[in-house]
Amino acid sequence: MTLVAIVNPNTDEATTAMMAAIARRTLRAEDGYDVRGVTVAAGPRMLVDEEALRASAGHVLDAAGRLLAGPDGARVAALVVAAFGDPGVEELRARVPLPVVGIAEAALRAAGADGRRFGIATTTPRLAAAIDARVTALGWSPQYTGLRLTSGDPRRLAARPADMTDRLAEAVDLCVREDGAEAVVIGGGPLGEAAEALRHRFPVPVVGPIPAAARELRLLLGQPTRRGTPKG
């Protein structure tokens, strides 16, 4: 089995389990993949500001180091960093001889494919500058239509999944109608179930960052050859 680790840069175990479950819909056991969620040992339960995002990079490195030094370390084939600012991604690439994918970079590549203009919808206003900076650093500014945010405390909204999905739907709609986006990224790993719920509500692609990272890793690792298993 090809072991892929989903490293959650916040300390919420339920979020880790949810993101790993979403990844398993693409990296399926029947295709030879074993997806494991890994939760960092320190930090907040949700990353809602730039200070926490920066600090989480060190926690990601620690979590990955513990995993790779552990009994299953030799089995790990790839790592996903599951926070939208991709904290620690570059540092991990410098340290480990494995594919490392950040969910933001994967989602932006999926949204911007074929020259599409894309926006981002998310719940964390205090991360707006960091998200915009990540878009710029990855070279997507010419296609970026901007960020649309939900209102209210993102932690309170996260405790009401149905409301969060509705508020994100409003933000996606603004990206499309007001900003001219041809695809919209849901900006955050903890928003994974909302992204899944919104995939078919709009006339443009709504990109969930966890599936985007999983699809990218499947290409990097190579789809195992199994009779009757579709590719892509």
Image (cartoon, rainbow, N blue to C red):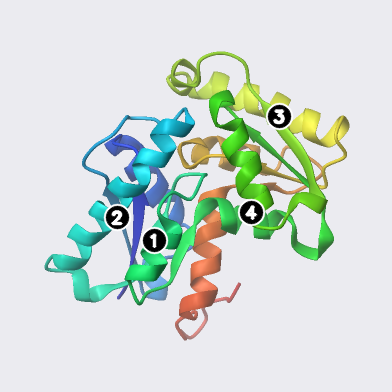
| Residue 101 as seen in the image, left or right of residue 44 | right
Picture layout, residue 90 above or below residue 190: below
Three-letter residue code for mark 3: Arg
Q: Helix, strand or loop at disc 3?
A: strand
Q: Which residue bears the numbered disc 3?
A: 148
Residue drawn at the location 50% of the way across and 21% of the way down: 154
The structure residue drawn at horizontal position 24% and vertical position 53%, both measured from the top left corner, is: 62
* Percent coordinates x, y for residue 35 in the rendering: 34, 61
Instruction: Looking at the image, tell me whether mark 2 or mark 1 is earlier in sequence order.
Output: 2
Q: Nearer the viewer, residue 159 or 95?
A: 95
Q: CA distance from mark 2 to mark 1?
A: 8 Å
Q: Secondary structure at mark 2?
A: helix
Q: Residues within 10 Å of mark 3 (few under 14, many from 20)?
A: many
Q: Nearer the viewer, residue 217 or 97?
A: 97
Give the structural element (helix, strand or loop) at label 1: helix
Q: Mark 2 and mark 1 in contact? Answer it, CB < 8 Å.
A: yes
Check the image and report above or below for 97 versus 173.
below
Q: Is residue 205 left or right of residue 72?
A: right
Q: Nearer the viewer, mark 4 or mark 2?
A: 4
Q: Is residue 230 above or below residue 113?
A: below
The first of marks 2 and 3 along the sequence is: 2
Q: Of discs 2 and 3, which sits in the foreground?
A: 2
Question: Horizontal and vertical percent for residue 108?
Answer: 65, 54
Occupied quadrant, residue 92: bottom left
Disc 1 designates what residue?
91
Q: Earlier in the sequence, mark 3 or mark 4?
A: 4
